[in-house]
Amino acid sequence: MHKRNKFISLGLSFILAAMPVSSVAAAEFSDGTAYTSDTEFEDGTEGDVEDDTEITAEEPSDEGASFKESMIPDADDTTDNEKLLEEYLNRILYEQDLSTQPGTSVAESVLSGVQQALYEELKSKITTVASKGGSTKFSISADLGLTWQTTARGKALDKEVSSHFDALNTSKIIDCLLVDCPYELYWYEKTASTTWEYGYTTTTTGNKTTVRIKNISVNMPVCNSYASGRYKVNAKIVQLAKQAAANARMIVQKFSSYTETEKLIGYKEIICYLTSYNDEAVEWEEYGDPWQLIYVFDGDDSTNVVCEGYSKAFQYLCDLSDITCYTVTGTMDGGTGAGPHMWNIVENDDKYYMADITNCDEGTVGENGGLFLDTPISGSVSKGYTYAIESTDMHYAYDTETKTLYGTGKNSVLLMTQDAYSVDGLTAKPAKTSITGISNATAGKLVLTWKKSKGAKGYEIYRRTGTTGSYVRAAEIKSGSTVKYTNKKLKKGRTYYYRIRSYTYDKNGKKVYSGWSAVKSKKVK
């Protein structure tokens, strides 16, 4: 099928005209609170470990040593100018202000405070590279509070430092970035080594030695197609990615007046219309473009993708539409045979449904819809799930990395519901809000203001203290029209980070949340 020479005028209009989305019924799909993991360092420190005590060295300071560690992910406090840059870049990528960037974030649920600080800085730098190109050797400026006292010396101290850094679990942070940033990491060569470097210093007072890990940096390799060096994204090639992002936004805009269910069906159909499965790619030794979503939206008829491209493209459109969607990896067995696979999970009214976009395409085992927003006939998170389609049964099993990242408890997004997908049971989310300002006119107080959210019955404000604290709920505003809150009894000299989400209620009185606003911070006088 000729698909993409006229990207919007032909492809999108064809789908919109041909797809009977307005008549979707719940019966059509009948066949077819968060897990948390807080990292604690071996010395027991966790969360906010800011220390205002100045240590005076009575012995010469030992500058310590430098370390380098490499990892390969599984294959399957900024200045005002930096904040302005983030907003500019987000408008390029999402054509929205920073507060309404994609709302589905695994990191918000599974990372500790200090991990989130590192995640947030890396995400900002990754977004910059995605838009402009440049070096992917990232130096971390945030003070992560990796400080403790010890009596160790020499090799024993080196081993202790390595243990503290390992407790940061950088591979988990990279995993979260891969899940949360399907577009921004189009350039990332995740099957090559990602290298972390860090050093430490010691300051001794009497018989006590204080150790601080510092100078953290990470080198993230670039796929050859986008590289002008092993760790540099070619700025000229970036224009292709930006055009693909613009094409994706056009699709989202065309579906802006549709219901959430209609959008999901539409996104599935148009992805399958715009791309085909790249059978040759699975035989290549190099990881690259066929695994990325860029090939779905680039308007080029000759570029096609594998399952990772299908699923990332679907999540990206959902992200831009504030639809809760996750990308997972594991194995699929049945139909075309067994092997590694990537697919999506979509949330509807606190229930989770499988969406295998790859196997919804023409000529696949699920082309008639049996593997989209479907419910399993048997299975569990630990053993995987079996789905019945016209000709056979299909089995999907999560891999260890996915189960570790998302969790396996009763509230895990990996737990598939037995309830048929219901169009009528879906409560529309309220619109996201954005923090419009944080002022500090009075000592010990911060005054937050935000945009009124359409459809909101109230707001929840979460706060993190410094770069190492964990987010806690600071306040609940039980009025959708209130857009101001004063946070009192704050400590002078400390920086506080805030994010806000709006909520409404479903027919049973349960809260339905929007995605989070972007994080904004302020130092208290």
Image (spheres, helix red, strand yellow):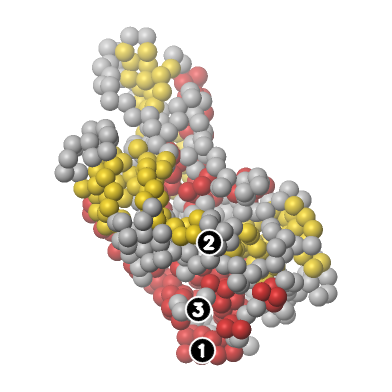
Quarter of image, res 95: bottom left
Instruction: For marks 2 and 1, give the CA distance.
Output: 34 Å
Q: Amino acid at mark 2?
A: Asp
Instruction: Decide: few, some or many residues near mark 1? Use Cα within 10 Å; few <14, some 14-19, many ≥20.
Output: some
For mark 1, give the secondary structure: helix
Instruction: For marks 3 and 1, give the CA distance.
Output: 15 Å
Of labels 3 and 2, the one closer to you: 2
| In-front residue for pair 120/48 | 48
Q: Position of residue 416 (x, y in %)?
A: 69, 57
Residue at numbered disc 3:
258
Q: Position of residue 254 (x, y in %)?
A: 46, 81
Residue at numbered disc 1:
13
Q: Position of residue 400 (x, y in %)?
A: 67, 47
Residue at numbered disc 2:
506
| In-front residue for pair 250/378 | 378
| In-front residue for pair 423/462 | 423
Q: Residue at x 75, y 52 (%)?
A: 380
| In-front residue for pair 378/2 | 378
Q: Position of residue 148 (x, y in %)?
A: 41, 23
Q: Residue at x 54, y 50 (%)?
A: 175
Of callouts 3 and 2, the N-terminal one: 3
Of labels 3 and 1, the one closer to you: 3
Of callouts 2 and 1, the N-terminal one: 1
In the figure, is residue 305 to the left or right of 203?
right
Q: Amino acid at mark 3?
A: Tyr
Q: Is residue 136 visible?
A: no
Locate the N terminus by quadrant. Answer: bottom right
For mark 2, give the secondary structure: loop
For the residues labelled 3 and 1, say whether their Cβ atoms are less than 8 Å apart. no
Locate the C terminus by quadrant. Answer: top left
